[in-house]
Amino acid sequence: PFNLNEGINDPHQEVIIEVQYDNSWIGSVTNQEIHQNFSGTKPGSITIQRPKGQAVWVISASAQKGDGSSDTLTLRIKSLDGEILAEKSTYVAHGLVATSVTIR
């Protein structure tokens, strides 16, 4: 349902929320006023779109480990071209990380 004339290939029109973790995890993202939960049992990602008409775009994301391991969970907000806009990691059992980015 994307219209290429609206610039969806612009790295700042969509971002990827990525969780790197090989075990159970839960995550959430807030895209202006829209809140979305997601989860997995292996590394995963979701892509979110910039709300129409927003000159300033604020994206907040969090992820939490679902187990007590000391393995590292990494949460990233990336542009479509792979540029890392924000990144946080934890190795703590049941650890929680949160990060945000503002795109103008």
Image (cartoon, grey):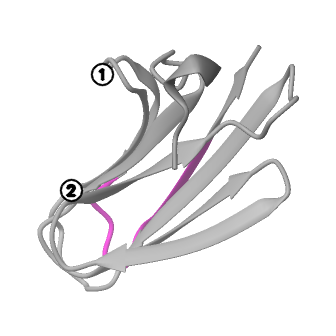
Three-letter code for the amino acid on which mark 1 is drawn:
Gly
Dot 2 corresponds to which residue?
A: 72
Q: Is residue 71 left or right of residue 74?
A: left
How far across and how far down the image is residue 1, in percent?
A: 52, 50
- Does the stretch in magenta take in 40? no
Q: Quadrant of residue 58?
A: top right
- Does the stretch in magenta take in 94? yes
Q: Is residue 28 left or right of residue 38?
A: right
How far across and how far down the image is residue 78, in percent?
A: 41, 30
User: In percent of the image, x 18 and y 61: which residue is there?
Assistant: 43
Crowd class of label 1 (few under 14; some 14 to 19; many from 20; radius 10 Å): few
Q: State the residue in front, 17 or 71.
A: 17
User: In percent of the image, x 24 and y 82: which residue is there?
Assistant: 24
Q: Quadrant of residue 6?
A: top right
Q: State the residue in front, 57 or 87.
A: 57
Dot 1 corresponds to which residue?
A: 82
Residue range highlighted in magenta: 90-99
User: In percent of the image, x 54 and y 47: which residue is there?
Assistant: 48
